[in-house]
Amino acid sequence: MTPKEFAAKINEWARGTMIASHGTQFLTAGEGRAREFRPELNTDRGTLTAEAEVIQRGRTTLVVDGQVFDDERRLVAKLLATQLASRSGAGRG
């Protein structure tokens, strides 16, 4: 299954759920829009430290910036994600 087919399948499964009711759609990153996976950056020993920060909080969504570092503070992985925000405000800190 290609990434495009996988995204289409998830969108199909989401019909009639809270995900779909919010207008959320899954899609793939086009070529040149996503970093290539570089396994040489992975680590098989030592300690990994993950850090995350909410960099934008809106009424219905929030943007989270996450990073994973090795023992020498070298960046191993990075994530920038948009999430649905809780309507109740739970988890705000």
Image (cartoon, rainbow, N blue to C red):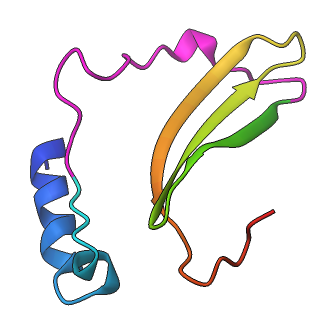
Q: Which residues are magenta?
A: 27-47
- Specify the principal SS of the magenta part: loop
Residue 19 position within the rendered picture, expressed as x and y whole percent measured from the top left: 31, 76
Q: Is residue 50 above or below residue 57?
A: above
Q: What residue lies at 21% left-to-right and 61% top-to-bottom?
A: 25
Q: Nearer the viewer, residue 16 or 84?
A: 84
Q: Is residue 43 above or below residue 60?
A: above
Residue 3 position within the rendered picture, expressed as x and y whole percent measured from the top left: 18, 43
Residue 72 position within the rendered picture, expressed as x and y whole percent measured from the top left: 88, 9
Whether residue 2 can be seen here: no
Tell me which corner region of the image, top left, top right, bottom left or bottom right, holds residue 86: bottom right
The residue at the far bottom in this view is 16
Q: Nearer the viewer, residue 31 or 22?
A: 22
Residue 70 position within the rendered picture, expressed as x and y whole percent measured from the top left: 81, 20
Q: Is residue 35 above or below residue 18?
A: above
Q: What residue lies at 66% left-to-right and 20% top-to-bottom?
A: 76
